[in-house]
Amino acid sequence: MFMTPYTRRRNEMSAFNPFRELADLERSFFGDNAPAAFRTDIRDVGDAYVLEADLPGFNKEDISVEVEDGYVTISAERHSEYEDKDKKGNYVRCERSYGAFSRSFDTTGVDAERMQASFENGVLRLTMPKRQEKQTSGRKLLIE
């Protein structure tokens, strides 16, 4: 006997999600091993935004950060050793996902020339200074 979790739907109209069927299809196809995008947090620290992306198990060399056309794109690729080791019979179970992962973020209001990136303990940190608006100095107009 299989147990399925019970979910309560309060109001079917307010809970309408046009992508629910697609998500259900993905879950039924991949099960718990569905490919997941990496998680990010973005904080406003006054004069800059700080984006932190969790990329555990990645090497710094496997991560790429590109700034182009008003977007910053973070890409990471993890290669699988599963196929090589499976031929030797070493794996009993393999659940870790591998492949290419990518996310893009809008950089409107960010000074892209001064962005900085660091990677430590599986966390990619982008410091994105805010674009400084040129303030015009006030002046008094003479009425002619």
Image (cartoon, rainbow, N blue to C red):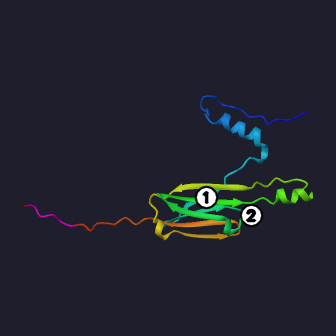
Q: What secondary structure do most residues of the magenta stretch adopt?
A: loop
Q: Residue at x 76, y 39 (%)?
A: 29
Q: Which mark is residue 57?
A: 2
**Residue in the foreground of this view, choosing between 135 and 110:** 110
* Residue 140 in view of the camera: yes
Q: Position of residue 142 (x, y in %)?
A: 12, 64
Residue at left 51%, top 68%?
115
SS state under label 1: strand
Per the rendered image, the range of residues in magenta is: 139-143
From the viewer's perspective, is 135 left or right of 96? Answer: left
**Residue at the disc numbered 1:** 41
Determine the image quadrant of residue 27. Answer: top right
Q: Quadrant of the N terminus?
A: top right
Under mark 2, the amino acid is Gly
Residue 83 lies, in percent from the top left, at 83, 56
Instruction: Place residue 141 in its image quadrant.
Output: bottom left
Q: Nearer the viewer, residue 83 or 4?
A: 83
**Residue 115 magenta:** no
State whether residue 38 appears in this view.
Answer: no
